[in-house]
Amino acid sequence: MLAYLVRRLFAGVILLLVMTLVVFMLFFASPVDPVQFSCGRNCSPELKKQTEKALGYDKPAVVQWKDFVQGIAVGRDYPDDPELRAAAPELVTECNAPCFGYSTFNTKTVNEEIAETFPISLSLAIVALIIWLTGGVLLGVTAALTKGSILDRGLVGASLILYAFPTFFIGLFALKFIAIKWGLWDKPVYTPIAEGGIGEWLYHLLMPGAVLAAVFMAAYVRMTRAFVLESMTEDYIRTAKAKGVRPRIVLFKHTMRAALTPLVTMTGLDFAGLMGGAIITETVFNFNGLGKLAVDANKVYDLPTIIGLVVLLAAFVIIANIIVDVLYAVIDPRVRLG
Amino acid sequence: MARITKRALAATAGIVMLSTTLAACGGDEGDNGDGPGGTAGKGGTLYVKAEDAIEHLDPHRTYIGLHINMLARTVTRGLLTQSTTDDPAPIPDIATDTGTMAAGGKEWSFTIRDDVKWEDGEAVTCEDFRYGYSRNFATDVITGGPSFYPLSFTDIPGAAEGAPEYSGPYTEKGQDLYDKAVTCDGNTITYRFNKSWPDFNLAVAALHFAAPYRADQDKGDKSNLEIFSNGPYKLEGEWDKESGGTLVQNENYGADDTGTRKALPDKIVFQLGDKAETTYEEIIADAGPAKTTISFNRLPASMFSQIGNEIPEDRYLNVASPFIDYLWFNTEKLDPALRQALAVSTDREAWINASGGERSYKIADSIINPNVPGYAPNSVWKDVPPSGDADQAKTILEDAGIDTPVKVSLQYPQSEGADKQAAALQDSWNSSGLFEVELKPEGDVYYTNIQKPDHDYEIGWAGWGADWNSPSTVLPPLFDSRANIQGGSLGQDYGKYRGDEFNKKLDEASIAAGAGDDAARDKAYQEGGHDPRQRRGLLPARERAVQLRLGLGC
């Protein structure tokens, strides 16, 4: 097991390095000139050169990539200009390893940006995960157990309808009508636990969390129903029933265990994706999480932030994959890692 | 404004809004809240919402008119400031008067008052102004601001070419050169320029590149989102770039002695990030803080239908902005007659209707905004109806022997709104039967491409606004080929307009301005701007800033 984990982690690190190199190359191959973008339109060629230097884009892309990787390994100081650092050391920003870079647009290290936005995305993803897993699995199992009934058809139909509504529609509807127009729920404003306690934190996360969870829940209802129904047709279930095992034991010990395995895979990947992928929900509710940070960084061609987020989000997916694979072995005794 | 971003609203609009809000808002807890149009009340909290983050709080890095007028001037006082009335003349702020010009505009002096204080109680000194101005030269640290102006005008070797030999106060390279160009004699600061800058007083009133800065508060890039105030408000706690911050009264600010900063609310809370639609929905719902909320963003065109219904007319302001939208033609590629025919056949009304109608835009008749002194309607548009004149265009083409339909293309930066506007233009040209127009939308790369000297675009969209109240910040930056076309860039001269006669008129205007002869200056600009009409871009629309006024508490 340990050798397996080490092997997977090593492969993950290599994958991350390749990804950062690809992003660097794509960024500099883009026809958009990030220096011009930052320098503005009253930008003389001389001013452009100085802005290029200030942004750190005056070196070849490969050198910049090497500096980036080095920063992750041993940390970096900003600005890069040795002359300026020698003349005015008070201007230097230290960025300890693993240093993801320095955003000149946000005037802070990417590590600081991530530290500020990560808790918001994590909170949102956790609340959404709880809502969609609880709702999706419960309703999916209910639909499977009442297959063919009005309840089953109603649940399947409702999940289909919910699935058809895009997140931005549900989000805007909730915000505009439930929060603003009807005043049924306060407009969500992310409140850290340290500031408002768990109650306040959860209250403000429920609406965006539910919006984010809606589409996932609809999908999980249908998938859970399908997986449970499929499991119920297995020979070992029939055998268990024939042996007179109580229905509750058949359902929870035998049927659900098999049905859960593919759900675990999906949950792990969905959760990891949500860490930086809740862009629409974060934008609609003005939650300054990783997704919104990524959108804002793209708007202004903030390469350090983009790269830092790519590494972080890719790491989430890689780690989630490893955790899912380990969980497989825990849930399904037939699976052995090695 | 040099920044073309459409999110940037106007100095004028900002000032009007600021004066309105700060004068009329009683606040949610104030001792007076007479509602719209009521008497001014003191106290309470004003909420200011904006969709986008504010990139810079550092005065020398702030260049967006809206941010200068709606935020920066509440915490930063400079030599001069702009009036909140329609009078475009600058008024003294920390200077004792509006300054003394000498040497034909190559030298300006201001005397600093000794009773203005920073938020820690220390006096604002002449050295603070000198240090603040020097920061513009640290172009590797102080980015994003209007440093273009001090860099090119200040009498430091290399400045005229855009690369001064002074590199700012951090490295102090070339410090002796700066020390000669900008000097303090007691309380009097003198700026020396390498060429005439007769508008310097207007420039420092409108922009903050000459604002004072305390050297002991300067942390370079790390000061970007910090405020060290000498104005009526100061920052409470920290400013968060994404979510905003809270300004509270600065106890070291004396009484409003310029008539421009009444500072009535106890607090001004800036809340960033909400979509404009969301903010306006809250304002319309009129509950809680929304009662004393204003927005940086324009009322979305999709909500215009609510004006007069959910939005009372008296809570709605429609303020003119200094921006002009225009179309430019590639003068190297399109025949003058073809350009003229395209211009007169353009249905400018359709373009405006596709952009939200008259609440968003109105037809312009000059590249110079009517708010700018020296504006005069361009006579070339007098006989052209707003919906275009296909017959006149046909005659022009026939006289020039150009076969129709002529195939041309229109390039523009793509967005949902821009697509609709471009489609309206295409319809107007194609429906005449004289043209076959192809639309070529582009993403952010548009602005990079139209500055390339070898671009082969035919027609393009652009927008411009004056940096201060003078045509000198409109015609020269847009059409002076000597300043624009150099170093592998077209600058703002996207249509590659090279006109020696026009450039001569610019020089005449500059000389007249240096001599203090405003009438001669305006005449020269008008002659330059109006005469070669068939070679210039056409000027169909003028943008307006559309704002919803305050909640009921104000």
Image: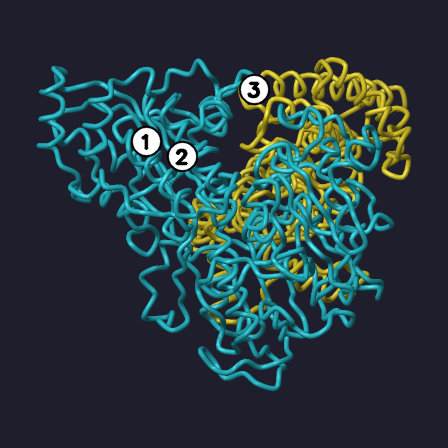
Chain colours: A yellow, B cyan
- Which one is nearer the viewer's eye here, A83 or B280? A83
Label 3: which residue?
Answer: A30
Which residue is rendered at x = 64% and y = 50% of the image? A128
Density class for disc 1 (Cα within 10 Å; few <14, some 14-19, many ≥20) is: many
Where A198 sits versus B444, above or below? below
Label 2: which residue?
Answer: B462
- Across and down, in percent, residue A30 comes to 56, 19
Using the numbered discs, state the Cα–Cα distance from disc 2 to disc 1 in whole angstroms. 10 Å
Q: Is residue A167 visible?
A: no
Density class for disc 3 (Cα within 10 Å; few <14, some 14-19, many ≥20) is: few
- Across and down, in percent, residue B169 comes to 82, 37
Of the numbered discs in the image, which one, if any, rests on residue A3?
none
Which residue is rendered at x = 37% and y = 32% of the image? B461
Q: Are marks 3 and 1 on the same chain?
A: no
Q: Are marks 2 and 1 in contact (CB under 8 Å)?
A: yes
Q: Are marks 3 and 2 on the same chain?
A: no
Residue A272 figure quarter? top right
Q: Is residue A303 left or right of residue B367?
A: right
Classify mark 1: helix, strand or loop.
loop
- Which one is nearer the viewer's eye here, A198 or B79? B79
Which residue is rendered at x = 65% and y = 23% of the image? A46
Q: Amino acid at mark 3?
A: Ser
Of the numbered discs in the image, which one, if any, rests on residue B537?
1
Q: Amino acid at mark 2?
A: Ala
> Could you tell which of marks 2 and 1 lies nearer the N-terminus?
2
- Which one is nearer the viewer's eye here, B148 or A275? B148
Using the numbered discs, state the Cα–Cα distance from disc 3 to disc 2 in whole angstroms. 23 Å
